[in-house]
Image: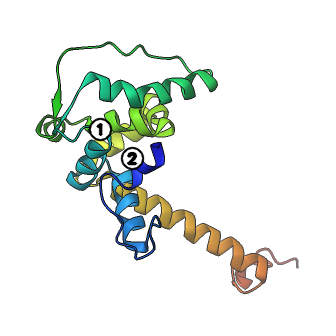
Amino acid sequence: MMMLLVFQVPRKFSSKVKGKMGYEDFVYFILSEEDKSLEPGLEYWFKCIDLDGNGVLTPNELQFFYEEQLHRMECMAQETILFEDKEDYISLRDMKSCKLSGHVFNILFNLNKFIAFETRDPFLTRQECENPTLTEWDRFAHREYIRLSIEEDIEDASNGSGDIWDESLRHPFKLR
């Protein structure tokens, strides 16, 4: 049921094959997953949690998803956080006005990102504040570009197709 909620409830697949995610669906999902704080991501994950489709998130809906994360935290021997039941509800407008809304969705859907946020490096946080124009998606794309270029360099070197050795460095010191 969780897979159906995450993939097909917020946005019906555009793929012609029933129950299969197409390329467009995959791209939309990755964009929503990597930056839950931008409007498309906020709306995507909000629709996942809004089980009754009434436009507000209730404590019961939030707790439904939190229970799965709670189990995962226990399995990973992470300190768990109690879910305190409040009688309030959260609207999409509330989520859009909250600077930490992306992290709220990570608490409910992506434990690895939540733990990374909780244990984040203060130096990296400072760097993020120095360049606030970058979104989470921009940071993700940058990290992936660097990772892929490093992998490509390693592959080129192992295949002998990359000229990573500068001949001028072969004998930097000449013996007389």
Indicate whether 72 appears above or below 6.
Answer: above
Indicate whether 150 appears above or below 159.
Answer: above
Q: Cα distance, mark 2 to mark 1?
A: 8 Å
Where's residue 33, x and y in %?
A: 39, 52
Image quarter hosting the C terminus: bottom right
Q: Which residue is mark 2?
A: 5
Left or right: where 65 falls relative to 57: right
Left or right: where 161 falls relative to 52: right
Quarter of image, res 137: bottom left
**Kind of residue sitting beneath label 1:** Leu
Applied colour scheme: rainbow
Where's residue 100, x and y in %?
A: 26, 34
Q: Residues within 10 Å of mark 1 (few under 14, many from 20)?
A: some
Where's residue 94, x and y in %?
A: 13, 34
Residue found at x 26% / y 45%: 47
**Kind of residue sitting beneath label 2:** Leu
Disc 2 or 1, which lies upstream in sequence? 2
Quarter of image, res 60: top left
Q: Residue furthest right?
A: 176
* Residue 165 seen in the figure: no
Indicate whether 167 appears above or below 23.
Answer: below
Where's residue 166, x and y in %?
A: 70, 81
Judged from the image, the secondary structure of the residue bearing numbered disc 2 is helix
Residue found at x 44% / y 69%: 18
Judged from the image, the secondary structure of the residue bearing numbered disc 1 is loop
* Residue 12 seen in the figure: yes
Q: Which residue is mark 1?
A: 51
In the image shown, does 83 or 114 lie closer to the viewer? 83
Marking on residue 36? none
Asked whether the residues under the numbered discs 2 and 1 touch, taking CB atoms below 8 Å apart as contact, a structural biologist would say yes
